[in-house]
Image: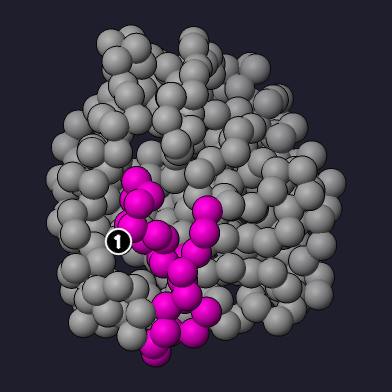
Amino acid sequence: MSETSLSYELSRSPEGAQPDPELQHLLEASWTERHDAGVGFRYRLHIERERVAEGKFGFLILLNRKRLTERRQPYAFLLDAPFDAARFNFTRIDPVEIQLELGGHFPTSILINNSPVTVYHSLVVPDRQGQHSQMLTPAGIRVPFELLLRLPDRRYRIGYNSPGAQASVNHLHLHLLRIDTDLYVQQTELIPVRGYIPLLHRLPDHLPAQGYCFVVRDPIRDLEPVCTGLGTLITALMERKMAHNLFWTWTHLRDGREIRAFVFPRAKQCVNKVACSFNAAFLELSGFVSVGEVSDYEQLTEDIIVQALRDAQGDVYGTLGDLFGTDGSN
């Protein structure tokens, strides 16, 4: 197997962001080659069991015990912690873990996730050599849209965990995964939020998670203002020292019509010192639950999951009520 990473050029303009089977082939072939050869991975992905929890939200629950026992142990760091070159970071990985280098206006490395949750689970690292801490940069906000617009398969999703919201490495990275099942966030109702951030919506109160959403229906028209709005919201959360999780997804898996970018703020931060069987991070908040214990797989119910997510987030809408109104409007 070649240890030389492949390259792909990202067009700079929204007009050039068309689905490209070649990019998807490069991603999938480079991941599969390494996974099947056992190169760089801590284990071979094996989803032992999966089920959909009974209830209104259709939580997908998967059992993957090796991710709990074999993954790299996360380390704790604060929301505003600077990059620390002495700790593990993605400039120190084995070159064989680099799947693809994306060139263009937003240079980005695609790395294998050596402890995958799903097939083709990869890490998206904008400006890897720039050694950014795990706080979203403008490139970190933009690149997920650029990737989803170019991957023909609408099952791909991208997620992000900030420090204090289950991030495990303080070096800017996002997660690219293929999820074959619809999640509750894809087609749920969205409530417009009037205020100083254009195009902002929020989730209805009855949902498991509290959060906000931006929608890209027409990339040429919407991409720039949505990225600007996302940046403004992230800045407001940082000013209040609020950790956050993000999730980018198409609304339809077959013929994606629009991309939704969700922001799940947290009224309280967590300290993620050890890997746990069930965490409340971007996947769980969006409806996808991967566990590492058989007992969790068998016993988790929708009510238990919802309560865990609400406990993890706290009262987000109440905390941000002065910005957006306690009812989500301003």
Residue sitting farthest toward the bottom: 196
| Crowdedness near tag 1: few (<14), some (14–19) or many (≥20) residues, C-alpha within 10 Å | many
- Find residue 55 and report its image quarter: top left
Residue at 20% across, 41% down: 272
At which x and y percent is residue 5?
A: 67, 43
Q: Is residue 94 left or right of residue 282?
A: right
- The residue segment tinted magenta is 188-213
Does the stretch in magenta take in 302?
no
Residue at 71% across, 35% down: 28
- Find residue 148 and report its image quarter: bottom right
At which x and y percent is residue 158?
A: 54, 50
Residue at 23% across, 38% down: 307
Q: Amino acid at mark 1?
A: Pro
Nearest to the observer: residue 95 or residue 252: 252
At which x and y percent is residue 273?
A: 16, 37
- Whether residue 19 is visible: yes
Q: Quadrant of the N terminus?
A: top right
Majority SS type along the magenta span: loop
- Whether residue 83 is visible: no
Q: Quadrant of the C terminus?
A: bottom left
Q: Which residue is mark 1?
A: 265
Image position of 234 with respect to 174: above or below: below
Does the stretch in magenta take in 208?
yes
